[in-house]
Image (spheres, rainbow, N blue to C red):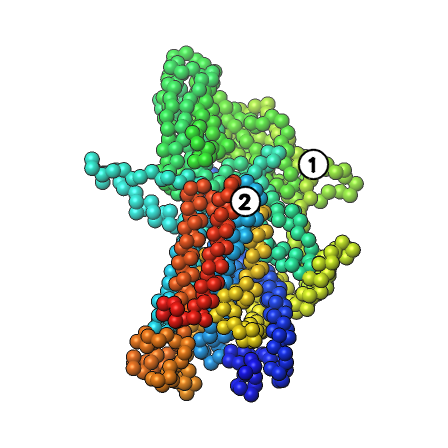
Amino acid sequence: MSCCNPANGGEAGVYFLPIFPMEYEWDRGFRAFLYLVGLLWSFLGVSVLSDVFMTGIERVTNSTRKVRRPKLDSNGRAILVDGQEQYEEVQVLIWNPAVANLTLMALGSSTPEILLSVIEICFSGFYSGELGPGTVVGSAAFNLFVITALCMLSIPKSETRKIDGFLSFCITTVFSVFAYLWVYISVMDNVVTVAEAVITFCMFPLLTLMVYMADNGLYSKMFYTIARIRPDELDDETPPPAPMTSTPLESFRSFSALQTSRSIIEDGGKLFLRQNQSRVKYRHLALQSLMGGKKITPEDLQAPELYIEKNLMEAEAESLLPVIQFESPNFSFLETVGIAKLVVTRQGNLSVEADVEYQTRDGTAKNSVHYEQTSGVLHFDPFETEQTILIRILHDLEWNEDLEFTTELSVVDSQLVKLGGMYQAVVTIIDMDGPGVFEWVEKEPQFFLSSDSAAYLQLQRMKGCTGDVKIRVRTVDDSAQAGQHFVGMDELVSFKDCQASKTVKIRLQNFDKPEDAGEDYMVRFFVKIQDMDDGSGIVISEYDTIEVRVEHREQADEDEEITWTQQFKQALSVNGGQDMADASATGLVLHYISITWKLVAAFIPPPSIWDGWATFCVALGMIGVVTTLINDLASIFGCIIGLEDPVTAITIVALGTSLPDTFASVLSIRADDNADNAVGNVTGSNSINVFLGLGLPWTIAAIYWHYTPPTARWLETYQGTPGNRPRMYPSVQNNNAFLPENGGNGGFVVAGGNLGFNTIYFTILTVIAISTLLLRRFVYGHELGGEGMINKVSAALFLLLWFAYIIVASLQTYYPSSFPAF
């Protein structure tokens, strides 16, 4: 009998095909060739549509909203004006980045597998099929084994890659292993109940919640809340808590799920944030290359460096390490103070313990004459932000000018603790009881860029530090004009008693360069300090004016919003719209093969419409249609060449739906400095495949059959007669809950024989693969790459695991009696 012969009732589980009524009479080999070409072409189509779908998701997850929050100074304290707290409106992301990655982003990369499973059940009268579940497991095997192996082989020689979001990786790994074990438990008796299906689906929000907690550092807080013991609870027999074996950097990164790798670099005295490209970007570049689009250049793989519009202290506060520094670079005390208290603050990562050493050094003030030299170690407990250094000041009977000595912080291991910009503090001993002399710390002109958000200037108080005083700070226009180049300032700056320094912030505005100006166009203005003449007795030194120079820098143009017209132009363009003469023959062929799908995708609304939701909805519908076509093509192709649906699913279909992620992972492992984009999220994607790809359609079907009594088709398909049971089920009849002798009377039946074996077998191989990655991390310090043969051996092992899965799972499909019954 020919496949899909209408005279024989057609082929079960197909919806669009065959197109031609008498197609079953064609040559079998010719039909197989046509369906294989159609299948590969459809894989290309679903990849193109998924790419557009991902751009919509990226727009949705990057949507922001305005919130009103208190203004904070550089020390993180609320800014008060006349006793009133000041507020500002800022744009914040609507979606938590970790939640977005694990929900919408995972949905984008797993859409074909999920929709294939949903469509197969919903369009077949809510009967379980084998193509959808097989694709879910087969795609998971390809992702974990093949993509990881290719990433290992793609790393440049002698380089290594490590998973930075390790806690997230561990959470999703545990969930992925449990997911497949749960599938096995659910199908053991060949019936999936409503409770089992709902639990499968509800694992998805539970996983999302746990990753959200990790992203917000809640695990670290819970850990220290539970593990921390008060000193009065310790007795002689109670051992102290064990020290942490990981560095604070590793601990902090492990508490931040799905975190994009980033590093702070300094160039010309300015701080920049360097970060990896997003996985969406890598996927888009990979598909462009596959379809004859713009060639990938090193510049495409390198994400832009973003200038950090903060002063040094604010930038360091965002470091992944604990950042420790003095509260102020200058402290002043009367010589009668007795004990000088120097406040040391901790910012950045607060979740770990931190130690810093301190040491005093003589200046004009001498040890044992004007103060007592001291040194020691300050210890910060988790979430402790302040410590105090106590220094005894000696009072003599002679009059002195202001005397100074220095207190300096230092760290033994820079991998554990980072020093902030104010790691030194000058302590001034004042022999006169006065309010002090005020001046600018810097005497030379200060340089900034027009793209900077503000100019930060340091004001200091010398030769006296008694009482609360105010001085006037105002800007004076020169070639730079207030309102055009900067925000004018004329304010009172307050100094508290014993406060010796203050940071003045002047907001800058990005401005246009005149047409006749040279390449290095610069403007300047001045900032002056003045006495208030309020009888406080303060003195303004000769350094009462500081010059601020602002150099013009072109602001990077934001990405233009793409329109429908531009989408069609891009769809028709060769070589990314560049000179067609530069296009290679391969590029031209790939372009024309995919041009139909590019034109179809051009009809999808651009991401600018409804903040990406229009793109999301329309692309999802189109992917559903193409996925249904893939279901038909795969089923008929497998029938023509004699492949069972489970084998077709774990080989051809799984490979086709996973190719875009394969190329994206290879690109990212070469460009990134970690393995998070490449393989760190594989376990998360595999978990989502089960929770949505099986949990969603199972829940729909289980609820349907819970309220629908067995139909004639159901009885014929699943129960048959005691002497004529359906061959697709195991011979051990007491495991079949749907049989009447076991009390079965309807329900959602899932063939557990093949699926149960596949899941339990894949789980065993998964444990071997994850154990290999963990072993490499703890022995070599990284999961991928490295010198010697270890990387090649690891890659070979992962490929061997995939071949072992494909071969054994296929044999079990054709020879079920030779394998354990599930």
Residue annotated with mark 2: 673
Residue shown at the point (33%, 84%) measured from the top left: 722
Asked whether the viewer can see residue 70, the reply is no
Residue shown at the point (44%, 45%) measured from the top left: 776
Residue 549 in percent (x, y) is at 66, 34
Q: Quick one: 360 or 820, which is closer to the camera?
A: 820
* Residue 523 - label: 1
Q: Quick one: 337 or 358, which is closer to the camera?
A: 358
Q: Is residue 359 above or below residue 635?
A: above
* Residue 12 - label: none
Q: Quick one: 482 or 733, which is closer to the camera?
A: 733
User: Which of label 2 and label 1 is nearer to you?
Assistant: 2
Check disc 1 and give the amino acid type: Val
Residue 763 in percent (x, y) is at 40, 60
- Which is nearer the N-term, disc 2 or disc 1? 1
Q: Is residue 350 above or below residue 797?
A: above
Residue shown at the point (25%, 38%) measured from the top left: 239
Q: Quick one: 517 or 482, which is closer to the camera?
A: 517
Residue 1 in percent (x, y) is at 54, 83
C-beta proximity under 8 Å, tags 2 and 1: no
Quarter in which the C terminus is drawn: bottom left
Q: Quadrant of residue 517?
A: top right
Callout 1: helix, strand or loop? strand
Check disc 2 and give the amino acid type: Asp
Q: Return the residue found at the far top.
A: 398
Asked whether the viewer can see residue 781, the reply is yes
